Amino acid sequence: MHDFNAAGIQVYALSYDEPEALRDFREAYDISYTLLSDPDSAVIRQYGILNTLIAKDDHPWVGIPFPGTYVTDASGRVTAKFFENNLVLRAGPEQILRAVTGEDTDPSRTQPPGTERKELTPNIFVDGPRLAVGVLRELVVRFEVPAGRHLYAAPAPAGMLAVDLTLDDHPKVVAKALQRPASHTHTLPATAEHFEVHSGRVELRIPITVNGTVVSDEGNDELTLSGTVSWQVCDDQVCDVPQQQPFEVTVPVTGVVASDLQARPGQSDIRARNALRHFKKMTSRRL
Amino acid sequence: MAIEIETRAEQTDKGWRDADGFVGPVRPGNGPRTDPRSEFPTGPEVGAVLPNFQCLDVEAEPFDFYAHRGASRAVVVFFRSAVW
């Protein structure tokens, strides 16, 4: 949340809860962003995202939206949106911050110096502090490709290896499709052949989260992600030997889904005390 | 538009597991667990201006989105419930 505030970004979260229910939520998690109450689902309907799969008499569930997030620029124009078919999934704060700040992942603009033939070492990490149930974070492989050299984009030319990241299946992990960065066309001076390549800082990302099977009593679980990174780095004359390296990344996991946009959970017992009262009110006002 | 409900589910000793492995007390396809199987409406598209709206803030005071946002970049999250 600090990052959003520091960048002057306004964060809003809207639901069909009553204001007093949102006050409890705010206090339980020490929330600083703007909570909004839409108890008749008027805004949800106005935006066209009412969950119409729920029967009109199925209280209190009727009135909820298809959950999602919009990101806008300073003029209020939508620059990104995050909606998932599985309604447990939601975009992690890191992805949202990247979308709203437009953080530079354009590889051609960050060319590190260097002409020595050093081994290129990819950096593999998860972009958040932990994996929480339903919150999508990303497994990232980052290459800093020196100036004058490039990696092949997929599909690679015959006989060459495209940069790739694969994640082994894990029963506790839900993974979405690999996201590749934009490539650019590179022309070999000698032959005038064109190839699609990546250069500079190159990041491949796999959105991941954990499903409910991670919950343990202490909540101190860790999980090890494994997979393979493949790449082949070339300059205009010669290509290095293609590389395929297995990796392992260990990340803490938690079953508790605290407020996503904040790093630390607060006192959730105030929510538990009043939750039944709020739930009854939400049901009765709709009957 | 007719949207199909995702009903793939497996009963386990801890509850109902959906196709992605999430386990919960409610069977997928019912109540709060009605997920869309394929395309579903997601509101304003990328490139569109987010419409203004009025609702209540957390103090139960009237709230106007455009008035509050001013000229700031915004993140607007529609979530299901802070209670359940």
Image (cartoon, coloured by chain):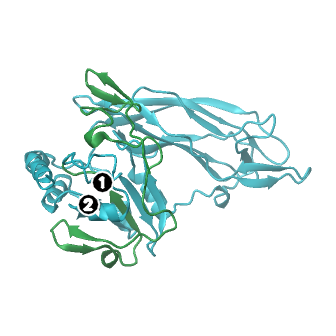
Numbered disc 2: what chain?
A: A
Q: Nearer the viewer, residue A236 or B36?
A: B36
The hue used for chain B is green
* Residue A70 against residue A161 in the figure, above or below: below
Assign the N terminus of chain A to one quadrant of the image: bottom left
The image shows a total of numbered marks equal to 2
Instruction: Residue at the far top: name it.
Output: B13
- What is the letter of the cyan chain? A
Numbered disc 1: what chain?
A: A
Q: Are marks 1 and 2 in contact (CB under 8 Å)?
A: no
- Residue B56, located in which quarter of the rendered image? bottom left
Whether residue A205 is visible here, answered yes or no, is yes
Q: Residue at x 76, y 53 (%)?
A: A148
Give the residue at mark 1: A262
Whether residue A12 is visible here, answered yes or no, is no
Specify the amino acid type for callout 2. Answer: Ser
Q: Residue at x 22, y 29 (%)?
A: A217
Foreground mark, 1 or 2, reads 2
Specify the amino acid type for callout 1. Answer: Gln
Q: Nearer the viewer, residue A173 or A204?
A: A173
Residue A102 in picture, x, y percent from top left? 51, 63
Residue A278 in picture, x, y percent from top left? 11, 52
Residue B45 in picture, x, y percent from top left? 48, 62
Asked if residue A198 lies left or right of residue A217, the reply is right
Label 1 or label 2, whichever comes before in sequence order: 2
Give the residue at mark 2: A41
Q: Residues within 10 Å of mark 2 (few under 14, many from 20)?
A: many
Q: Residue at x 68, y 58 (%)?
A: A108
Asked if residue A203 lies left or right of residue A224, the reply is right
* Residue A159 against residue B63 in the figure, above or below: above
Label 1, secondary structure: give it: loop
